[in-house]
Amino acid sequence: MTRKPRSGAAAPADEAGPTPETAAKLRRDLVQRLAAEGRLGREQVRAAFEVRRIWEAFGRGLFPATNTMAAAAARGRRAMFVDPIDRLTRQEEAAWRLRYRPWAREMAVTVAAGAVRTTRLQLILDVVVDNHGLREVEGWYRMRHGGAVEHIRAALHRYAEIAGWVDEPYPETRKSAAIRVNPENRMGQEGAGDPDEEEEDCL
C-alpha cells in the first residue's frame, strides 16, 4: 500500500526540500561549529578530523569515474578486487591501524544513554562523518537535549587519549554516562567472536 502524504497534496518536485543527505552536506560543518562555540577542544577537533579523513580515505575509489569504469569493463574478468587498505596512504594506514581501529572497536561496544539503543561510534558517524545536526540525532535516539554532544566529546577525547594527544581521561558526566557491553556477549553471542570480523564491523 502506498503511503499517503502527511498533509494535503504532495509538493511539486521542484518545490520539494532537499533530502536529509543533501541538507547535511549543505549544513555548516558541525565540528567547526562546536569548536567555534568552545564545545570541542583542540585535540577533540583533531580527533574528529582524523576520523573523517579515514572514512573518506576508505571511500576513495568506491565510485570511480566513468572512464575508469569503462576501462575496468574492458578488462573484464582480469579486473581484480583492490583491498580498501591498499587505497590508504602510509600515514592514513598508520592512523587507521594504531588509532582508529582500537578506538572504533571500543566505541562500538560503548552504548550511549538514550531511549533508542545506539553506540558512541554511531553518534560519531552521524555527526562527525555525515554532519547531521545534534537535535536531529538526539531525536533519532530519543536522547535528552545536550546528551549527544557530551557522548561525542567523550568519544573524541578517548580517541585523543589512545593517540597520546591527551593524558587525562574524559570526566564522565550524567549526560555522557555510557554502558560498556562485553563484545563476547554482543548480539546474544556466547564466547568470543572472530576479532577480524569485529574490526570489519567498525571499518
Image: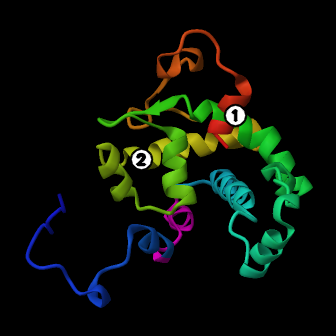
Q: Which residues are magenta?
A: 26-38
92 left or right, relative to 138: right
Q: Is residue 166 visible?
A: no
Describe the element under mark 1 as helix, strand or loop: helix
Nearer to the camera, 45 or 183 = 183
Q: Is residue 28 visible?
A: yes
Q: Residue furthest left?
A: 8
Nearer to the camera, 191 or 166 = 191
Tag 1–tag 2 contact (CB < 8 Å): no
Q: Residue furthest top?
A: 191
- Relative to 161, residue 16 above or below: below
Q: Which mark is residue 148?
A: 2
> Which quadrant of the figure contains the N terminus?
bottom left
132 left or right, relative to 104: left
- Relative to 141, residue 58 above or below: below
Q: Residue at x 38, y 44 (%)?
A: 147
Q: Residue at x 82, y 39 (%)?
A: 98
Q: Earlier in the sequence, mark 1 or mark 2?
A: 2
Give how far across and how far down residue 156 sits, in percent. Answer: 61, 45
Q: Quadrant of residue 45?
A: bottom right
